[in-house]
Amino acid sequence: MGEMLDIYDNNRIKMGAAQARGRKRKKAENILVVMVLIFNEAGEMLIQKRSPYAIWSPDMWTMTAGGAVLAGETPTKAASRELYEELGIKIDFTNSRLKFTMTDKNAFLDYFIVRANVDLSTLNVPNEEVAAAKWASKEEMLTMIDRGECMPYRKSFLEFCFDCADMMECTLTK
């Protein structure tokens, strides 16, 4: 059996039994998704280039890491899992608060922001999902969006994420 996801109503209340990932959801059926954004002391975001074989956004540069929260999993556990699966970075989010939540079509997106000077040579890339990783400034990411190299984030949203990077909620662990 594939991955199972809890389904939530529009008020973020679990609706019952978990359902298989990829199943088409009705209008009022939502999943939880976590996003982790890592910024260094220079104010750059750690970004990843998705593998050409990745299901989601192949060959595109995206924010640090993220993915669906599995059935029975907390957003903090999912943030730790996704970051480790995609980049090999271990961060304990247990006592962390998410920075902000957004809604998207059929999803609640929980954003965690971390300030850490990650050494790119220690990352577990390339792998099945991620082809490469690098540090990028806000200006570089905006240019990458214009050139079609990066996910087409709304520029105002990307600027908001960089503005939010001033406050750190967790630390890098070895």
Image (cartoon, helix red, strand yellow):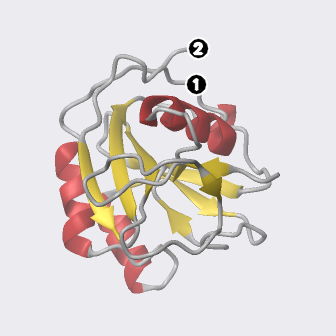
Counting the numbered discs, the total is: 2
Horizontal side, residue 102 vs residue 17: left or right: left
Horizontal side, residue 67 vs residue 113: left or right: right
Residue 110 drawn at (x, y percent): 35, 47
Q: Residue at x 52, y 78 (%)?
A: 149
Residue 31 drawn at (x, y percent): 46, 56
Q: Residue at x 41, y 29 (%)?
A: 116
Q: Residue at x 28, y 28 (%)?
A: 97
Residue 96 drawn at (x, y percent): 33, 23
Report the residue that reaches farthest toward the front.
16
Q: Label 1 sits on what residue type?
A: Lys
Q: Are marks 2 and 1 in contact (CB under 8 Å)?
A: yes
Horizontal side, residue 156 vs residue 24: left or right: left
Q: Residue at x 47, y 32 (%)?
A: 74
**Viewer-nearest residue: 76 or 12:** 12
Label 2 and label 1: CA atoms lie apart by: 7 Å
- The residue at which mark 2 appears reads as 174
**Viewer-nearest residue: 122 or 173:** 173
- The residue at which mark 1 appears reads as 90
Look at the numbered disc 2 and give the secondary structure of its residue.
loop
Mark 2 crowdedness (10 Å alpha carbons): few <14, some 14-19, many ≥20: few
Residue 57, by quadrant, is bottom right
Question: Relative to residue 102, is residue 87 depicted above or below?
Answer: above
Question: Relative to residue 170, is residue 80 depicted above or below?
Answer: below
Who comes first in sequence, dot 2 or dot 1?
A: 1
Report the residue that reaches farthest toward the bottom.
147
**Viewer-nearest residue: 20 or 172:** 20
